[in-house]
Amino acid sequence: MTVQTKRATIYFEPDLHKALRLKAVETNQSLSELVNDAVRGALAEDAEDLAAFDERAEEPAIPYDEMVIRLRKDGRI
């Protein structure tokens, strides 16, 4: 199965580009593979976060000042 790809131009900071090139050589991957994997991972984390927000949508909101008071009572701050 062939994966259709799209071309994009990405500008990296020089040190970041150097690190990516070195990692690509060490892992026998292309820069595109590394970037695709990183973006895919970031999007997966976002999907997990959104799912967690949906799961907790019915929980009551706690005002900030009330949360600070609770944290102080519990000795966390």
Image (spheres, rainbow, N blue to C red):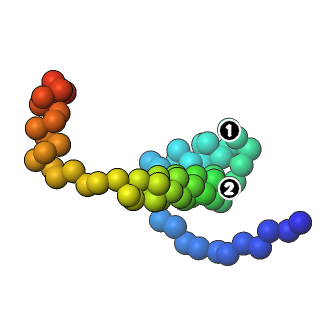
Check disc 2 and report its element: helix, strand or loop.
helix
Residue 31: in sight, yes or no? no
- 20 or 50: nearer the viewer: 50
Mark found first going from the N terminus, 1 or 2: 1
Q: Residue furthest top?
A: 75
Give, as a three-letter code, the residue at label 2. Answer: Glu
Q: Going by the image, does 75 lie left or right of 40?
A: left
Residue 52 image point, x, y percent: 47, 52
The residue located at (52%, 67%) in the rendering is: 10
The mark closer to the camera, 1 or 2, is: 2
Quadrant (top left/top right/bottom left/bottom right) for the N terminus: bottom right
Task: Using the image, determine if residue 8 lies above or below residue 49.
Answer: below
Q: Is residue 70 left or right of residue 35?
A: left
Which quadrant would residue 58 be assigned to in this image?
A: bottom left
- Asked whether, in this view, residue 60 is left or right of residue 48, the answer is left
Residue 14 circle label: none
Count residues near mark 1 (Cα–Cα under 10 Å), then give few for <14, some for 14-19, many for 20+. few
- Residue at the disc numbered 1: 26
Dots 1, 2 in contact, CB < 8 A: no
Mark 2 lies on residue: 33
Residue at position x 52%, y 53% from top?
48
Residue type at the position of mark 1: Glu
On the rendered structure, is 33 left or right of 14?
right
Q: Image quarter for residue 2?
A: bottom right
Q: Residue 35: image x %, image y %?
A: 59, 56
